[in-house]
């Protein structure tokens, strides 16, 4: 069994949160490990310091830490065929819902309001709608104001890259350690199919000429960031038939230029969004097509697989969206930053995280010694904290892990419609969940009823709540050893 449980609720919920200071400060460690942050062996300490609290730049951190976006930079200097600027920026968000546009002062009020209520908050991002580097005045004013009030918050921007080279020096001065560039091509002939026009140097360019300028500016921006030690993530939108094969080339180019992570995201295309691709019937990739491409990219620039394509006004852990709780009309007119909840949360996470790392390392040993050449695809219902702590019927997404002789890796997530709402289970939603979990061998959750368990079984997917509240890797390690080692797989349906 794993270490004594500290649930996500106990880390962040208001009721139990009040009890945490005594525990956190007592130093009484109930676990078997030292409780320090556990840095992956192969990683440089300075890099680890930068990413250990960033939910996007570290898969491990995304179990504990939250980001929030403020939509302060609405102007954009290019047109992407997957974007309708009436909605969120599709580079970093799910299109289809209009964001609340904020001034830098309103953004500051919102960030303080969220920081006082959401102890997991570690990153402030500017990620559309529009381009943070092009709409620079608003971006800069927001970052300066927030950094003055909350010194330890990480500042993060997402950009299409066209204006980036002009802003690198100021980004470095403001201690912005994390930048994302959306790069969908390195061949301007392919770029011309994605970008109808750009606006650069007071002129509008179209076709291959536009894509050539964009490409050159993106590469130069990436090289400049690398030279200054700013961690850069590359987001690429996978557009079947347009750039899917080409992203292998993109991955090579960005690796050579020092990109820290490459995040291949599926195109979201729907006629209702009014985008060129949506209206012209361009489809997005299926979950298994995305995974197949990501698998082919292994060995190149390191992949991010836990992106949730969040909204431009998202708030919370990556799998959740609490943005509606913090709209301007719900915030007090005057707010004062109170650091106490965030500080206490960090102390508890430091210990919990060390325990989980130790459990993970034990689980990896179990998988490797099972001596099988086979792999197992496992879908997990979780609310965070690295534990199996969500009921099957309440899950809005499943995190998918692959166990194989290489170890246990997070390989993506599958969004689903919640199957059980207000105590009522919807058969139609269950059909959707089963189809979304295509290819998965086993589902792990905190609770599951006989009916959905039987229906999943008919669809060729086993499910169990026998590992409820365990660490994810501990459960997967035990399952894998039971499945392919000498012990029978007694715990699964
Ligand atoms: Fe926001 Fe982007 Fe910073 Fe993260 S999101 S600006 S790097 S703080 Fe994260 Fe959201 Fe994916 Fe972006 S899950 S869409 S990768
Ligand atoms: Fe839309 Fe963002 Fe592309 Fe600009 S960069 S067109 S806001 S997706």
Image: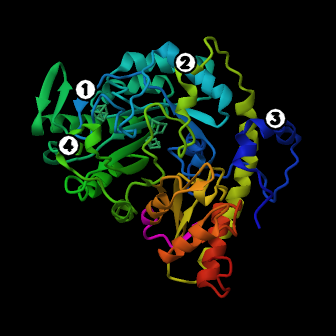
Where residue 279 is drawn, which disc sits there? 4
Write down the residue under mark 2: 329
Q: What is the basis of the colouring in this image?
A: rainbow
Which residue, given by chain and number where applicable, does mark 3 sit on? Answer: 18
In percent of the image, x 68 and y 77: which residue is there?
Answer: 491
> First in sequence: mark 2 or mark 1?
1
Which of label 1 and label 3 is nearer to you?
3
- Secondary structure beneath disc 3? loop
Q: Nearer the viewer, mark 4 or mark 1?
A: 4
Q: CA distance from mark 2 to mark 3?
A: 27 Å
Q: Is residue 327 magenta?
A: no
- How many neighbours does mark 4 have within 10 angstroms: few (below 14), some (14-19), or many (20 or more)? some
**338 up-or-down from 229: above or below:** above
- Residues under labels 1 and 3: Cα distance? 47 Å
The disc, 4 or 3, on the residue closer to the chain's N-terminal end is 3
Q: On the image, numbered disc 1 is attached to which residue?
A: 77
Separation (CA) of disc 2 from disc 1: 31 Å
Can you give x and y, in whole percent of width and height, for residue 204 in the image?
14, 25
Queried on whether the Cβ of the residue with tag 1 lies below 8 angstroms from ligand 2, the answer reads yes
Q: Is residue 197 above or below residue 298?
A: above
The region drawn magenta spans 435-443
């Amino acid at each position: 069994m794993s270490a004594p449980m500290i649930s996500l609720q106990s880390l962040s919920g208001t009721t139990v949160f009040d009890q945490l200071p005594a525990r956190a400060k007592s130093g009484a460690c109930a676990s078997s490990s030292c409780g320090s942050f556990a840095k992956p062996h192969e990683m440089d300490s300075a890099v680890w310091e930068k990413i250990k609290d960033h939910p996007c730049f570290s898969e491990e951190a995304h179990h504990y830490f939250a980001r929030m976006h403020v939509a302060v930079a609405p102007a954009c200097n290019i047109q992407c065929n997957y974007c309708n600027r009436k909605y969120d920026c599709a580079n970093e968000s799910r299109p289809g819902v209009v964001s609340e546009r904020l001034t830098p002062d309103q953004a500051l009020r919102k960030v303080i309001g969220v920081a006082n209520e959401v102890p997991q908050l570690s990153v402030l991002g500017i990620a559309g709608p529009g381009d943070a580097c092009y709409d620079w005045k608003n971006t800069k004013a927001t970052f300066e104001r927030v950094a003055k009030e909350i010194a330890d918050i990480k500042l993060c921007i997402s950009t299409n890259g066209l204006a980036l080279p002009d802003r690198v020096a100021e980004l470095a001065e403001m201690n912005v350690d994390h930048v994302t560039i959306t790069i969908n091509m390195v061949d301007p002939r392919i770029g011309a199919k994605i970008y109808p026009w750009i606006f650069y140097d007071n002129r509008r360019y179209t076709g291959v000429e536009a894509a050539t300028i964009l490409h050159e500016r993106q590469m130069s921006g990436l090289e400049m960031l690398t030279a200054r030690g700013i961690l850069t993530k590359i987001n690429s939108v996978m557009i079947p038939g347009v750039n899917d094969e080409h992203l292998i080339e993109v991955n090579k180019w960005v690796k050579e230029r020092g990109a820290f992570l490459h995040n291949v995201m599926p195109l979201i295309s729907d006629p209702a969004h009014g985008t060129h691709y949506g209206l012209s019937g361009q489809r997005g990739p299926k979950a298994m097509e995305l995974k197949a491409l990501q698998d082919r990219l292994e060995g190149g620039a390191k992949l991010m697989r836990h992106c949730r394509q969040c909204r431009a006004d998202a708030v919370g852990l990556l799998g959740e969206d609490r943005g509606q709780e913090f709209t301007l009309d719900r915030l007090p007119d005057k707010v004062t930053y109170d650091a106490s909840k965030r500080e206490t949360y960090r102390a508890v996470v430091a210990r919990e995280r060390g325990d989980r790392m130790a459990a993970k390392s034990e689980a990896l040993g179990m998988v490797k010694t099972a001596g099988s050449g086979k792999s197992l695809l496992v879908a997990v219902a979780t609310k965070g904290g690295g534990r199996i702590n969500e009921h099957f019927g309440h899950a809005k997404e499943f995190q998918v892990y692959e166990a194989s002789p290489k170890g246990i890796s997070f390989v993506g997530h599958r969004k689903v419609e919640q199957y059980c709402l207000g105590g009522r289970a919807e058969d139609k939603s269950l059909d959707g969940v089963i189809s979304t979990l295509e290819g998965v061998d086993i589902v792990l959750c905190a609770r599951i009823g006989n009916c959905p368990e039987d229906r999943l079984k008919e669809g060729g997917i086993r499910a169990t709540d026998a590992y409820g509240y365990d660490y994810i890797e501990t459960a997967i390690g035990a399952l894998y050893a039971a499945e392919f080692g000498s012990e029978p797989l007694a715990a699964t349906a």
